[in-house]
Image (tube, rainbow, N blue to C red):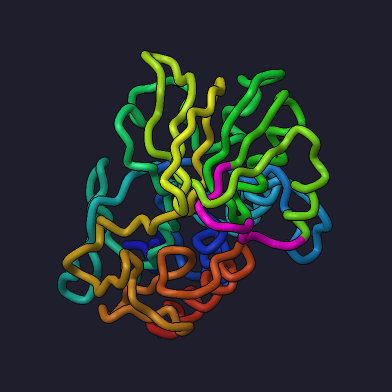
């Protein structure tokens, strides 16, 4: 039986593992995807203390290495549910069941989708410029969104694409002022405001999108070789629905990271909170780990 089983290997889960191992608790991290979570999609991180600039992959590698050096175990599995029983917690996963004395949910969030026809079938619809940007060298692309993630996508794509058009549903960009300034400096980046994507075009391959002005209702077609959707994230918590209290999909917990189920804690972007950054996810991971350690006695 594991002392602390952590679901998710993003910054919250990895930080929790580091703290738990330093307290000499046995730790197993279960991750269904890439180690590092959403931060691996960031080509350039400039607001993480101690590192003026580094990529999300680099930061993820450092966190994973530290957790492993301290003795944490990491397994690849998708958790499908948890079940408290007789003083322990059974964690159901696609490769079998695990038993733990405590559980930290750090499943983070996943990309929000447009919800449009053809979104799942067209080649050329992407949610990660780090992953797919190289396919569009000297080509034209669209970026849907106007927050930090969308601006980071646009800036990365601008380095190799001939033209980048951002489509923002509000009258202004909403991310950090520093990123807005960088976007404004790019000659090959254009922003269309007060507009939403209404349809995706193409037969097999993406060829363009129909956008609509939210103020006038006027529609226009933008032709491009690819489209990158960056309209935010939704918490990845379906596995816990019906067992834990959820608010807007997030596990309900305050800064203590305590859920309404004894022995189960939550950390990072899947927790009810106002600010979702790598630093706040790491802070949650530390808080949740220390709470689990106290619970174990």
119 left or right, relative to 195? left
x and y, in percent, of residue 229 in the image:
49, 40
> Where, quadrant-wise, is the C terminus in this rendering?
bottom left
Residue drawn at (31%, 64%) of the image: 249
**Residue 171 percent location from the top left of the image:** 58, 57
| Image point (50%, 79%), residue name | 290
Q: Nearer the viewer, residue 150 or 37?
A: 150
Magenta span: helix, strand or loop, mainly? loop
Q: Is residue 25 above or below residue 77?
A: below
Q: Which stretch appears magenta?
A: 167-177
Location of residue 226 by image quarter: top right
In this orientation, does residue 97 appear? yes
Q: Compared to 155, does 171 lie above or below?
A: below
Is residue 289 positioned above or below 60 on the image?
Answer: below
| Residue at the image position 55 percent from the left and 37 percent from the top | 128
Query: Does residue 158 appear left or right of residue 165 in this picture?
Result: right
Instruction: Give the x, y percent position of residue 34.
Output: 50, 41
Choose top left, top right, bottom left or bottom right for residue 116. top left
Seen at 60% across and 41% down, the residue is 166
Residue 141 in the image: above or below residue 268: above
Residue 94 pos. (x, y %): 25, 42
């Amino acid at each position: 039986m594991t002392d602390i089983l952590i679901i998710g290997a993003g910054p919250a889960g990895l930080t929790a593992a580091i703290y738990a191992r330093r307290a000499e608790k046995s730790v197993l991290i279960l991750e269904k995807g890439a180690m590092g979570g959403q931060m691996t999609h960031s080509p350039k991180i400039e607001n993480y203390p101690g590192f003026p600039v580094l990529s999300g992959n680099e930061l993820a590698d450092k966190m994973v290495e530290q957790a492993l050096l301290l003795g944490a175990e990491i397994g690849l599995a998708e958790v499908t549910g948890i079940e408290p029983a007789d003083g322990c917690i059974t964690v159901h996963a696609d490769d079998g069941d695990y038993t733990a004395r405590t559980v930290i949910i750090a499943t983070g969030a996943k990309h929000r989708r447009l919800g449009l026809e053809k979104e799942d079938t067209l080649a050329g619809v992407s949610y990660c410029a780090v992953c797919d940007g190289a396919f569009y060298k000297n080509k034209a692309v669209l970026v849907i969104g106007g927050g930090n993630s969308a601006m980071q996508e646009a800036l990365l794509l601008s380095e190799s694409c001939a033209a980048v058009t951002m489509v923002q549903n509000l009258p202004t960009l909403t991310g950090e002022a520093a990123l807005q300034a960088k976007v404004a400096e790019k000659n090959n980046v254009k922003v269309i405001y007060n507009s939403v994507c209404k349809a995706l075009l193409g037969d097999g391959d993406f060829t363009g999108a129909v956008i609509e002005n939210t103020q006038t209702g006027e529609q226009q077609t933008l032709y491009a070789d690819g489209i990158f959707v960056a309209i935010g994230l939704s918490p990845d918590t379906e596995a816990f629905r019906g067992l834990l209290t959820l608010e807007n999909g997030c596990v309900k917990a305050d800064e203590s990271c305590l859920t309404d189920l004894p022995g189960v804690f939550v950390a990072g972007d899947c927790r009810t909170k106002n600010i979702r950054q790598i630093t706040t996810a790491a802070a949650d991971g530390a808080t949740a780990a220390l709470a689990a350690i106290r619970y174990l006695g």
